[in-house]
Image (cartoon, rainbow, N blue to C red):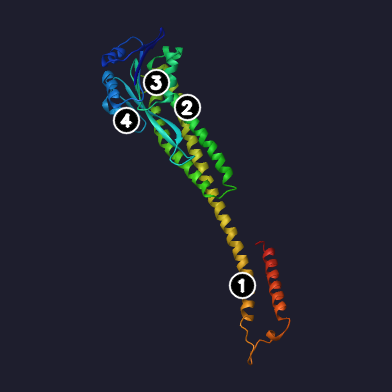
Amino acid sequence: MIQVVVYNHDGVRVVPVDSDEDLVAAREADGTTWVRATEATIDELDRVADAFGIHPLGVEDVVRNARPKTEEFAAYTFVLVKEAELARGEQPFDEEVRDEPVGVFLGDDWVCTLSTEAVSAVDRVWTAVERGDERLLERGADFTAYRVVDRLVDEYFELLDHVESQIETIEDEVLVSTGIETLERINGVRRDLLAFRKTAWPTREAVGVLARGDPDQIRRENEKYYRDVYDHLVQVVDLTETYRDLVRGARDIYLNTVSQSTNEVMKTLTVVATVFLPLTFIAGVYGMNFADGAYAMPELAWPYAYPAAMLGMGLVALVMLAYFRRLEYI
């Protein structure tokens, strides 16, 4: 789907696109031209690229979901950014980070946004143009490109807010639960943060080129807006690293809790085994039943032998339990 609007301080005009000639005419129209190709096929992306002189490798980067980057050309600047969101994973109640590349091609008086899927951030800026947002109408193509990038970065904060909520839940669980579900949740959040980090870090580098005002298509009065987006990305990266540290700490607490629980079990088993060891010895000795001969067991003929043996074993057990209690083993 290819849509075109031409706008300036006088208003907004939607341009129907029925042929490649319409795209070429839109590029030459007075004002700022924005071409949006969303949920587009490769053929549709190539049509836009041919009409605006975009290098085919730029389209290929969008289709192949390449790493975020900024590349400068003679007539335009290419910025590849990504929409990142948490989507339902393969397992029930499992979410994973998924990204969608958005190619922003910025010319002197035109901007093209290309994507193979619908991108909500681009849709919101497009709606603002259609409604006649004065700042978008008056500040040119570079400001429109800024708004698109800024909306995409704002969604990063929404994703991190959701991750933060998950981390808070995990921190409460690791202190009271050593179930495998808790460990799976910890590993899930670690994977999400790692996947998101692969998007956030190169995006910061790409926007940094724009924030410095290196491309000729970015006017000096609009550089400050890109610097603001760069500052947001620095904060995003810092939060990502902080959350990774928190998850790593939660995993360490979980492993320590499991280890402590195992130690408690082993200590209990050791006490029980130690208490029963002398009792087993006594029962073994008197279970030999040597009643005849020079070395016979005289206790076998004693009528109180059984209760005396049981009482003796009980006293031994009590003495050992008192000893372990004094040592604070139990």
Real-space CA distance between mark 2 and mark 1, rounded to the nearest whole angstrom: 67 Å
Q: Which circle, 2 or 4, is nearer the viewer?
A: 4
Q: Which circle, 2 or 1, is nearer the viewer?
A: 1
What's the residue type where badge 2 is placed?
Asp
What's the residue type where badge 1 is placed?
Leu
Q: Which circle, 3 or 4, is nearer the viewer?
A: 4
Identify the residue position indicated by label 4 in the image.
63
Which comes sooner in the sequence, label 3 or label 1? 3
Which comes sooner in the sequence, label 4 or label 1? 4
Most foreground residue, 44 or 301: 301
Real-space CA distance between mark 2 and mark 3, rounded to the nearest whole angstrom: 14 Å
Report whether residue 258 is seen.
yes
Identify the residue position indicated by label 1 in the image.
277
Identify the residue position indicated by label 2 in the image.
154
Residue at figure coordinates x 29%, y 13% from the top left: 22
Mark 1: few/some/many CA within 10 Å (<14, 14-19, 20+): few
Residue 81, image quadrant: top left
Q: Is residue 79 above or below residue 251?
A: above
What's the residue type where badge 3 is placed?
Ala
Real-space CA distance between mark 3 and mark 1, rounded to the nearest whole angstrom: 79 Å
Local secondary structure at mark 1:
helix
Local secondary structure at mark 3:
helix
